[in-house]
């Protein structure tokens, strides 16, 4: 994991204000309010737990959230207040039919190959109970098409220099990026990433082909409909034959 881990956490955290995370947490809490099924709700690729920690601490999901993450650095730097298991999205460490819900924020499920996206969604479907809710967050591909090439350079509050360049290919719906972080002590962290941005119709098909079905779609954190100016693409899904 050259991209996720220390590089990702150090370079992303300065841009994730407490206000942004609080809005996302409030949104997720609303999504899962009223969930009557027993069983845990898993944060798939929980990172340092910015959603899992507050959700598990108070509110509708208190005591029910479990983080799942592959990266040891993220797990060891995680916020207090929630249990977490180390595991791989491609082979989830949960029993079949055991989860009341799951969510994955920030395109977490779509940073792999097309084939792996299928494997991951099949794994999620395997672990959900009938009636369980899956919430997937990503960004509408139109946002990427507007500005396919991005170059970014910024000195972070701790004095690190962050450099990034990315290119979105509309033919494949894939954004390829390269990030480099030079720490104040001269240590350099670098990595590449690939994120697939599925148009809604393709995402709905992908869900169908992996045993899931889209139940609702939001274009933002207030639950607004998906429009041409939407900033987010958030899908609520359930088992197809749940
Ligand atoms: C885009 S980040 C999102 C982190 C967190 N959900 C958030 O919104 O801040 C994706 C996360 O997935 C984790 N991840 C990447 N590949 C994984 C895998 N194969 N299995 C489990 N987690 C993985 C990364 O380490 C990272 O923490």
Image (cartoon, grey):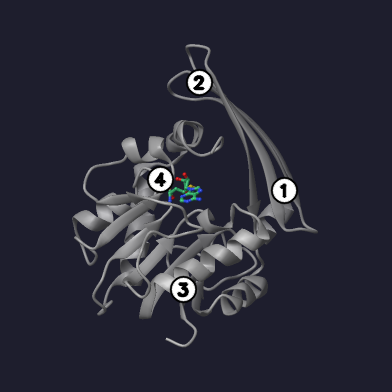
Identity of the residue drawn at 62% across and 71% down: 203
Give the image quarter of residue 188: top right
Mark 1–mark 4 Cα distance, whole angstroms, equals 27 Å
Q: Are marks 3 and 1 in contact (CB under 8 Å)?
A: no
| Badge 4 residue CB within 8 Å of ligand 1 | yes
Q: Earlier in the sequence, mark 1 or mark 4?
A: 4
Q: Earlier in the sequence, mark 4 or mark 2?
A: 4
Pick the front one: 215 or 91: 91
Q: Is residue 219 visible?
A: no
Mark 2: secondary structure: loop
Mark 1: secondary structure: loop
On the image, numbered disc 2 is attached to which residue?
A: 160
Identity of the residue drawn at 36% across and 75% down: 97
On the image, numbered disc 1 is attached to which residue?
A: 147
Of badges 3 and 1, the one in the foreground is 3
Picture coordinates of residue 48 (x, y %)? 36, 42
Identity of the residue drawn at 34% across and 43% down: 18
Mark 4–mark 2 Cα distance, whole angstroms, equals 21 Å
10 Å crowding of disc 3: few (<14), some (14-19), many (20+) = many
Q: Are marks 1 and 4 in contact (CB under 8 Å)?
A: no
Pick the front one: 225 or 108: 108
Q: Which mark is residue 155?
A: none
On the image, numbered disc 3 is attached to which residue?
A: 125
Mark 3: secondary structure: helix
On the image, numbered disc 4 is attached to which residue?
A: 47
């Amino acid at each position: 994991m050259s991209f996720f881990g220390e590089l990702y956490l150090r370079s992303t955290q300065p841009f994730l204000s407490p206000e942004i995370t609080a809005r996302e947490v409030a949104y997720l809490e609303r999504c899962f309010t009223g969930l009557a099924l027993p069983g845990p709700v898993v944060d798939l690729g929980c990172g340092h737990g910015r959603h899992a920690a507050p959700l598990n601490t108070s509110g509708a999901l208190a005591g029910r959230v479990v983080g799942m993450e592959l990266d040891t650095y993220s797990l060891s730097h995680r916020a207090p207040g929630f249990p977490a298991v180390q595991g791989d999205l491609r082979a989830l460490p949960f029993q079949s039919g055991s989860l009341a819900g799951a969510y994955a924020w920030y395109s977490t499920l779509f940073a792999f190959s097309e084939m792996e996206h299928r494997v991951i969604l099949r794994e999620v479907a395997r672990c959900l109970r009938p009636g369980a809710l899956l919430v997937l967050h990503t960004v509408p591909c139109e946002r990427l098409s507007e500005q396919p090439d991005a170059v970014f350079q910024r000195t972070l509050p701790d004095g690190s220099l962050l450099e990034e360049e990315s290119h979105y290919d509309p033919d494949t719906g894939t954004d390829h990026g390269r990030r480099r972080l030079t720490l104040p002590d001269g240590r350099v962290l670098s990595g590449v990433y690939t994120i697939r941005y599925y148009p809604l119709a393709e995402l709905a098909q992908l869900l169908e082909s992996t045993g899931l079905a889209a139940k609702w779609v939001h274009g933002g954190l207030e639950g607004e409909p998906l429009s041409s100016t939407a900033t987010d693409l958030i899908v609520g899904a359930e088992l197809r034959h749940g």
